[in-house]
Amino acid sequence: MDLDKIDVTSQPPTEEPARQYYFMAKCRARLKEFEQKNGRLPKACVTTFGCQMNARDSEKMAGILECIGYQMTESEEADFVLYNTCTVRENANNKVYGRLGTLHNYKKKNPQMLIALCGCMMQEESVVRKLKESYRFVDLVFGTHNIYKFAELIAGAYEADSMLVEIWQETDTIVEDLPVERKYFFKSGVNIMFGCNNFCSYCIVPYVRGRERSREPEEIIREIEKLAADGVVEVMLLGQNVNSYGKNLKNPISFAALLQKIEQVEGIERIRFMTSHPKDLSDELIAVMGRSKKICKHMHLPLQSGSDRILKIMNRHYDKAHYLQLVEKLRAAVPDIAITTDIIVGFPGETEEDFLETLDVVRSVRYDSAFTFLYSKRTGTPAAAMEEQVPEAVAKERFDRLLAQVQTIAAAQAKAYTGQTLPVLVEQVNVQDASLVSGRLSNNSIVHFPGNADMIGTFVDVTLEECKGFYYLGRKCEEKNPQE
Ligand code: 5AD
Ligand code: SF4
């Protein structure tokens, strides 16, 4: 789309994405003036908190910032700083408040700086109230539902003389075909659905991300074909619960069927996805994974708790036995599959017996890695109102025991691969040692080995020489990989 051809003196179009391109052209004209006045390009920085969904949203917003004329930078001492926030646990919110002070100091030095906040945390009324009261130097606040209007919001912030706040409670619109600035040229996240309908009793996501909406399969395939043509070899399909993808479309389709379509896209070598909910993980999906050459040997399957009693109060809709059965089926269909998980410790009412059930699942499954979280009370969720909140010291003690167990098992799991030669998709030159490059195995493990920047984005067969706990040191294998 050629922004210079857009007539910004006319009324903005009402349809999307044309409307956003109109506002991009408008912003671009303004930034040209900035360049003339200041004798330099304006700089923008996007900082992402939280999950892969946010990371993908940030790529979309960076795409718009770049398109309108900002030079992207890693430094927050910039002319436009955007924080894409997370609110899944309380400490995510605290991090943002903590860093806003620093941004304020930068703004005092550069009064034309604009500070924008968006994402999940902004969907909470108490947060917006606090920003309006105590953080009045913030220029633009928007949520999760109107990110596609970013260009229009920036244009509004340029004109506004006080904080511009635009939070929507819900949307059913999915706007395709806006610019995106990918962080990696060879891999990309792809949203397949938005929102969540599960209402796990501890979780704030359904309140801040809204109801579940799936993208049309044709749109997803079209995007992936374009990515492949642009050099992408690995896609990560994103959704809060990918296993329920497509159920609410006019022409329903299963996640497994979508995967089979994506497999046919030429140029795509690896397909990842997250997150899977155990209650919706189908035999069809397991069978498709078993047959696939492209779907990565990795399943992230959040357990949350191993206690049937707690799982019920969490509103998870599965029990320990069902979960263990899924793991068994996955391992039978995909030998060598890495299984990872999320676990919450200290959910209201959790007893020592409940916790031991969780430890028991950890020992039976033998996770390749696990994210462990201390339960965090999120206002507005059912769990926040539950009596019997677990004392912090008790939760912390359980957390430490869990972590020790998870780490011991993960290290042992990883060690089993030592000596094997496996394809690594090289991602970057190693940050600590420039003679090494770093990449990932199909099972998502990280491997460092001697190499150079030319290897980035390519697959290299690497012999895993030494296991360092959760990563490997390896060496490029000169012979053909016998496993291929
Ligand atoms: N407290 C602690 N952890 C939580 N998660 C979600 N909500 C909470 C909460 N209130 C964890 C879950 C989820 C992961 C993304 O974050 O384990 O799978
Ligand atoms: Fe939160 Fe549960 Fe939805 Fe995951 S599935 S986002 S934990 S409500």
Image: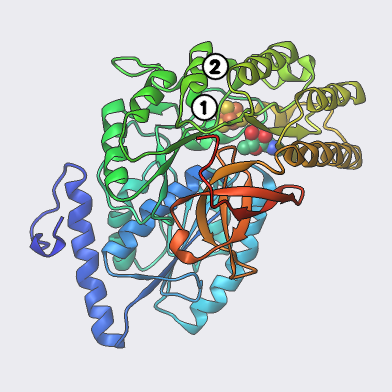
Q: Residue 414 falls in which quadrant of the image?
A: top right
The residue pinned by badge 1 equals 241
Image location of residue 118, percent across then percent down: 46, 52
| Number of numbered markers | 2
**Nearest to N terminus: mark 1 or mark 2:** 1
- Ligand 2 occupies quarter: top right
What amino acid type is highlighted by mark number 2? Asp
- Closer to us: 273 or 441: 441
The residue pinned by badge 2 equals 280
For numbered disc 1, what is the local secondary structure? loop
Residue at x 81% of width, y 36% of height: 409
Q: Is residue 18 left or right of residue 56?
A: left
Residue at x 56% of width, y 31% of height: 297
- Closer to us: 190 or 292: 292
- Labelled pair 1, 2 in contact (Cβ < 8 Å): yes
Residue at x 66% of width, y 14% of height: 318
Q: Residues within 10 Å of mark 1 (few under 14, many from 20)?
A: many
- Closer to us: 433 or 418: 418
